[in-house]
Image (spheres, helix red, strand yellow):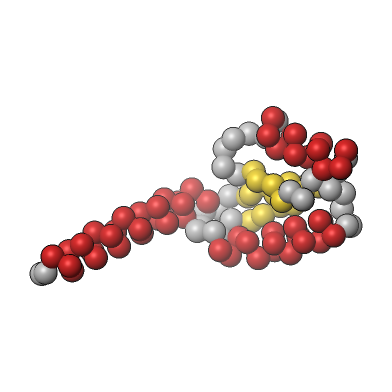
Amino acid sequence: MSTISLRALAIGAMLAAPHAMAADFYQGKTLNMMINYQAGGPADFEGRIIAHHLGKHIPGNPQIVVRNMGGAGGAVGTNWLGQVAAPDGLTFGSLT
């Protein structure tokens, strides 16, 4: 086997490992997506479209649940995300 082939094989293995670990982590889990505006507005509409399709693009195909936290021009939800939400990799925000 040539040196180039061995390097390509090593690079492929390094790139596949994080994907496999992420699939194991997210398999069967539910992600919480916080939208920092009330339900029914344009920010909510865009966030829900993203949530509907995003799970298919994350290894392990997790379910995504939307949580609206409106108030103070988006500051309530943003502050909750930074100060209260558990840093467990299962909560993220769609901030506008």
Question: Which residue in the rendered view is the most extreme toward the left?
Answer: 1
Left or right: residue 35 compared with residue 54:
right
Quadrant in which the N terminus appears: bottom left
Q: Quadrant of residue 42?
A: bottom right
Compare residues 13 and 3 and report the one nearer the observer: 3
Name the residue at 75% across, 57% down: 47
Q: How many marks?
A: 0
| 45 versus 32 height, above or below | below
Left or right: residue 56 compared with residue 23:
right
- Give x and y (percent) for residue 37: 84, 48
Name the residue at 35% across, 54% down: 17
Name the residue at 57% across, 37% down: 88
Name the residue at 63% across, 34% down: 86
- Give x and y (percent) for residue 96: 77, 50
Residue 94 seen: yes
Left or right: residue 24 compared with residue 34:
left
- Give x and y (percent) for residue 94: 71, 51
Q: Quadrant of residue 49?
A: bottom right
Left or right: residue 14 compared with residue 44:
left
Residue 69 seen: no
